[in-house]
Image (cartoon, rainbow, N blue to C red):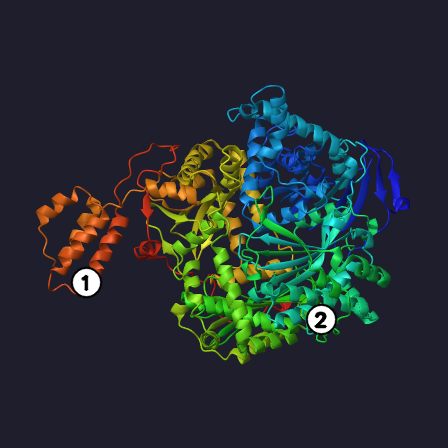
Amino acid sequence: MNEGAWTRIEARSNLPPYHLFTKAIRKNDVDKREYRLIKLENGLQALLIHDSTADKAAAAMDVGVGHMADPDDIPGLAHFCEHLLFMGTRAFPSEGEYKQYITSHGGSANAYTSTSNTCYHFSVSAQHLVGAIERFSGFFHSPLFDPSCTLRELNAVDSEHRKNAQADVFRVWQLSKDLSIPGHPFGKFGTGNIDTLTQAARDKESNAGHDAQAALKGDEKDGGVVGRETRRRLIEWWETHYCASIMSLAILGRESLDDLTKLVLDQFSAVPNRGLAMPTYSIPWGPEQRGKLVLCKTVLDVNTLEMIFPITGQDQYYRSKPITYLSHFIGHEGPGSLHSYLKHQGWVTRLWSGAQSTARGFALMKLNIRLTKSGLENYRAVLAVIYSFLSLLRSAPLAPWNFEEFKALQEISFMFSDMQRPDTYVTRLSEHLSRPWAKEDILCAPTVVWDNDEGLVRRFLENDLLPNMGTVMITAKDFTPIGVVSNWQKEKWYGTEFQIQDLDSSLLAKATGPNQIKELLLPHPNEFIPQKFTVEKRDVSQPSKRPFLISKTAISTVWYKKDDQFWLPKGNIGVFVRSPIANSSAKNSVMTKLTRNLVTDALTEYSYDASLAGLDYAFTQDDEGNLLLQLGGYTDKILKLWHHLLEKTKAHVVKADRFLVYKEEIKKGLENGLKREPYILAHQWMDYALRDVVQTIEEQIEEIDYVTVKDLQDHMEELFSRARVNVLVDGNFNPNEALEAQRLVETMFKCRDILPSEAIDRTFLLPPGKSFVHHQTLHNTAETNNAVEYYVQLADYSDSTLAKLRLFSHLVNERAFNTLRTKEQLGYVVSSSFWIHASVAGMFWRVQSEKPTEYVESRIDAFLESLKEVLQTMSPADFERQRRGLVTKLAHKYDNTDEEYTEFALRILDRTYDFTAKAKSAALIENLTLSDIQEFYAAHIDPNSKQRAKLSIHVHAHAQAAATKAADKPIKFSVAASNAFLVDLKSAQVPVDEPQYLALSKAEPPLDAVLQFWTMHLGQVPFISNEKKEHLLARAKELALQHPVAAPAVGDAPSTGKLRDGTIVIGDLMEFKKGLQLFKPATPVMGLEVEEVPADSVGSRL
């Protein structure tokens, strides 16, 4: 398109010729960036973005080929290419050079493979863009596909598939692909695994009379004969499909557009053009695939109904967006909507509608509904209602005001869109460059609507969205409620059980008739569309780093910051309610969840129009007992909505029918929580071990059945009767509006203050010099992965210690990933980071793996030990480069007001009010030396440190858990525990034959035997009360855990899967916590007194 808008720029000053797009690219009024679109002689398109204020640069390359182009005999090859492509280039042959450069300069890098495209992207500190591009560009013209990495990356792809094997999103997606026309490329298995990637090579070996199973050699890094053949096929595929003419690049940096142009021409002109056109694909459903009902069993207990209509790709209709327009009606949640009717029948809790851009050439129009138990049982009635609503749309006139309102909402969304993170922004734009849009519309085309093409809308309604043209997929863990118990098929790649039936013919016969449900209506005009976009703008030398405390009463404080850098008519209001009962018990925790769900449910019909108009409301809770009521968006009508939301929240009356719906949903959610990925569960158990007040999922499940409507109504009244409230107002507000938000809160809630002790969060301290491990078994019996979360705690939260922790983490995180995942292949999920847990600092290493957890921990230990030499041999130049990269990262400006608001909210919620924590750390890191980090490591991280405090959580898949249980030995009562217990016995004046006691103690008997003896003996002592007896027996258990029998030495660098010498196995976590001390609560870094807002922070309206 727009061929006449391109001008050829001839070669000059050692630069090759290129083509320049000469039309102005439309951008919104607040976007101060400069844009230039060029096309290289090899056909590669590049969108260049100059941002003089950027502290982060970014780039993304979208390649117009994905897994639908996989060879039929090597499923997953495009994905494998994405993995191996990172492993060195001709100019930078070291496999880790690219990522090391990016991370050491405060950035990150990643990639993804989709159906018809693959995207590579990174961000980096702005001053290091050129070096990053030099390393990045080689992937597309001179990759090495390092042979020594072949087997390793084959295993990485396989590990990624195994990680996803129990995830319903992958299972259901692959099933929907498998149901397409046989042989259509959409049906391919895009992730791949080690079997699919090597089968062709193994078949080749077998046909040659060789042992194919032995040919993929684990002791050869290139994978032996099979690995080498797979790599050969990969290179052959890359040389066929990776072509400049189907590549689109987006780069954002501080450099001028001319400098960015030169950089792109220098680095990407060498990308070969193989003469390919952008591949497009036909709709993968024919007549035989339509009009079907698919029943799909899930791992999690979630009931959904999804109606799927295959349609032509929507990019060509970007000016009118017919499917987006129709989704505006179908997905509406206001009065008279499809959602409203189904909700009032008790059949659904959520509904979403929209087009999924599935692959280049076709899309899927979807209506996705979360069904209640009753909804599943009545799914035919649910379908009948949906078909009735589609009939209403076909027959009802769509008034011109409907389209004008839709158009206005889309225009407002674009004109006042928030700035995105640079890497997110360029990733999206690189993909959009290949869309068939007018190039001048590249920024606005995804959002803005120009034309009211009702004829096209009608065509889709009358031809594509007919009941017999789609497929209905129902997912559930159990189909017994609808009488389906047998005759299940299994999907090939994930083993998902499913059935396919024809849609009920009698239902289809009625489906195209006129709508008979009078309650179904089209939306009314939206009263929340903003009309005023006034921004209080002023000249500022530097944006304020924090909000100001402008009001403080007996129960609430209000923090206020005027937007002084984004200049959008938007803002956020947050009310953070600290209620002592919100999370004080398992039952209360469940009731608080019910409260937020029911209040949100009751507000939906009123607030949905507001959400369409850019005002988003959320009522959530955190683990510390804070209720978070948050509203964000255009400030024109925000206080009107705020008043209504607060009023309805406080005055909510529990309705029995909705209570039962959400009680069922929350119980399912809790039960599903027990089947989450192992690494997530490991982190949850770590949090439980460290947190003062916390309830397990199991405890909440036990309580939920006993909650009644009256219990909940009483809980809701008490929840807001005593509380401490913080109000945060950030954005396009003046101080009076912030005070009005506070007044509304106090007027509605009328609560009393809580005690100071009820407003603090505490963390348990691990004893120094101790190493603990706790084992848990997964509930999901089909999960094959284990997980280890390995945590080292620092009993110090000073600014200097936190700065050292941040720098140490920055120095080792990429190395941990490269060692534990890339080189040692422990598993696909590997991460590490520092962690601030309720004012206690620490660092964790997290690995999900099919290998035994003891082995995984031993490899983490070995990695941590290796850091001693790494730090000792690190050059001053390398240390300085990485230190500077972290300082730059910490100095990163907020990209939008939501980011700023979130950071302020977190500092209020953690009660430090340390709004400039990152800046303070950056200043301290400026002065840290390598010897500081070496000393920090030796004291806190080194496994051989005498003062290190460590806890690891091992989550076991069932097979491995059984092996661990069999290998476990009974807990013994050590000599040290006996000596300590003797002191307690004497203190309680229990008669003891001391010589005999000490002699027996040397044998270190099992704890069970000790408890059995003293239960009987103490029962015979007449002056020992039952309470004292129970105390002494509990004390014996506690001492056994505190003073374990020393484990046999296993060497300095364990590699056999054994835990280190002295590791203490924790049985009962609650009992373990009873023996720990609590760290002091968070301390505010500033005085919490009312402040005068600086004059230049108030502003005046323009």
Q: Secondary structure at mark 2?
A: loop
Q: Would residue 1062 be found to the left or right of residue 1085 on screen?
A: left
Q: Quadrant of the C terminus?
A: bottom right
Q: Quadrant of residue 1049?
A: top left
Q: Nearer the viewer, residue 548 or 107?
A: 107
Question: What mark, if any, has residue 1101 been given in the picture?
Answer: 2
Pick the front one: 229 or 240: 229
Residue found at the very far top of the displayed protein: 209
The amino acid type, in three-letter code, at marker 1 is Lys
* Residue 617 position (above or below residue 80): below
Task: Please indicate, yes or no, whether residue 436 appears anywhere in the rendered image.
Answer: yes
Q: Quadrant of residue 511?
A: bottom right
Return the x and y of residue 248 as percentages of the image width and height: 75, 41
**Residue 727 % position (x, y):** 54, 70
Task: Work out whether residue 353 or residue 54 is closer to the camera in this orientation and state it.
Answer: 353
**Which mark is nearer the camera, 1 or 2?**
1
Quick one: label 2, few (<14), some, or many (20+) residues within 10 Å? few
Up-down relation of residue 759 to residue 886 (above or below)? below
Query: In the rendering, at what x and y percent does residue 262 appear?
Result: 77, 37
